[in-house]
Amino acid sequence: MRFLFRSLSGLFITFLTFGLLFLAGFQLWQAVVARDGGGPARDAAEQVYTARLLTVTPQVVQPVMQVFGNVESRRRLQLRAGAAGQIVHLDPALQEGGRVEAGQLLVRVDPSSAQAALDSQLAARDDAEATLRDARRNVEVATENQTTLERQAELRRAAVERHLALQQRGLGISSEREAAELAVSEAEQAVVSGRAGLAAAESAVTVAENALRRAEIALSEARRDLADTEIRAGFAGRVTAVTAVEGGLVSLNEQLAEIIDPDALEVQVPLSLDQFSRLLADGGGLEERPARVILDGSAGRLTAEAQLDRAAASVAEGSAGRIVYARVLSGGAALRPGDFVSVEIAEPPLANAAQIPAAAVGSDGAVLVADAAGRLSAVPVRVLRRQGDDVIIEVPAALRDARIVAERAPQLGAGIRVRDAAAPAPAEDQQAQSHRRQGNG
C-alpha cells in the first residue's frame, strides 16, 4: 500500500509539472504573437505636452540698467594744524562719527607764542602811528614857517619898490636901496630853505606812512598766526579719520581729522563703453537721467533717489570704460562714503519691444511659437536688453500678438504639439489619457 501511494503521488506531481510547463509556453506564445502584430491593434494617440504660454504684445518698454558703484562725498574738509605746538583744547564732538556745526571750535593749539608776537606787533604799530603823527605835525610847522618867510620876502620886495620910487623923484639914497635889495635876496634865500624843510617834513610823513603800513601788515600776520591756533568747522557735517588727542604735540600742516558733509553724497559708477553710449544725449554729452541707489543688507533694503550728474574727465589706467557720477537727491541719510551699492539707471525707452522671460529664448536665439492647434515653430528674435531674469526683445511681424513658450524644456522643439498650462485639458486628451491608463493596466 505504501508503494502504491508513493507511485500515485509521483505520477500526480509529474502531470502537474507538465501542465504548468504547457501553460507557461502558451503565455509565451501569446506574448510573441502580440509583439509581432498578431494581436488586436490599438490606435496610438499623439503625445501633447503641457507648457506655459504667453502672448507677445509690442509696446514701449523702459529698460533699466543695473550696475554697481561706490558712495563718495562731494564735500570733504581736512582739518590740518595751522600752527605747531601742544593741543590745549579738544572739542568732545571731534570723534569718529561726531556731528559738528559750521564755525564750531574743534581744536586749539597753545596760543602763548602767537599772542606774544601779536602784542609785539601791536606795540610796533603804535610806535609807527606816533612817528606818523610827529611827521605830520612837522609838516604843519614847516608849512606855517614857509608862509611866514614868503610874507617877509613880499615885504622886502615892497620896500625895494618904495626906494626905487623915491629915487626916481630924487629923494632916495642909493645905499638904502642896496640894503633893501640885499634884504630881499636874504628873504628869498630863506624861502628856498623853508621849502627844503617842508619837503623834508613831507618826505618824513611818507616814510612814516610806509612804516605804519608795514606794521599793520605784520600785525595782520600776527593776528592770522593767532587765529591759526584755533581750528573750526567750515561746514556742518560728520567727523572721520580723527588722529588728534588733547595734550599731544602737532606739527605745522599735520592732518588732525576730516569732515564729511552727509547731505552731499554721490555714487561713482564704472560703465562699459556700450552702457555709456546708451546714456548719451543727441549732442554727445551725458544726459541727466534719474537713478535709484540700492543698499542691500541683512536688515533690509535701503533705497535713495539720485540723478546722473557728470562723467569723469579721464579714463582710469588699465580700464577701457567710463566712470559716471550720480548725485544723491533724497533718501541718502543711511548711506555712508565707501558703501558698495547697486544702481538702477533708467535708459531711453524702446519702441516696438516686449519683455519676456529669459528662459523663453533658446541657445539658438529663437523662441517657440504655438499656432492655433498648439503646434510649435521656431522664430529667431533680437535681444535688445537683459533685465535680470527677463530679456527685452524686438517684436517682428511674425511675433505680433503670438503665443510663445515661456520656459523652454528639453522635450520641446519645432513640430511638437503643446497646450497652455493655464487652459483646461481638452476632452480628447482626457480620453487618450484614460485609454493609455487602461492599456497600461
Image (cartoon, rainbow, N blue to C red):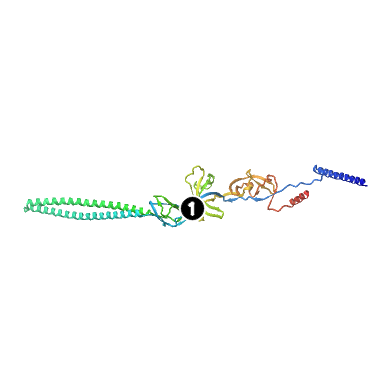
Residue ID at (32%, 52%):
218
Labels in figure, total: 1
Horizontal side of 406 relative to 69 (left or right) equals: right
Could you say where residue 104 lies in the image, as x and y percent from the top left?
42, 57
233 or 346: nearer the viewer: 233
Could you say where residue 56 lies in the image, as x and y percent from the top left?
63, 50
Residue ID at (22%, 52%):
201
26 or 431: nearer the viewer: 26
* Quadrant in the picture for residue 18: top right
Horizontal side of 189 relative to 131 (left or right) equals: left
Horizontal side of 176 relative to 364 (left or right) equals: left
Crowding at mark 1 (Cα within 10 Å: few <14, some 14-19, many 20+)? many
Say which element carries label 1: strand
17 or 415: nearer the viewer: 17
Could you say where residue 330 lies in the image, as x and y percent from the top left?
51, 55
150 or 313: nearer the viewer: 313
Three-letter amino acid code at the position of disc 1: Leu
Could you say where residue 240 lies in the image, as x and y percent from the top left?
46, 53
- In the image, farthest residue toward the front: 2
Q: Which residue is mark 1?
A: 265
Residue ID at (58%, 51%):
60
Horizontal side of 178 relative to 195 (left or right) equals: left
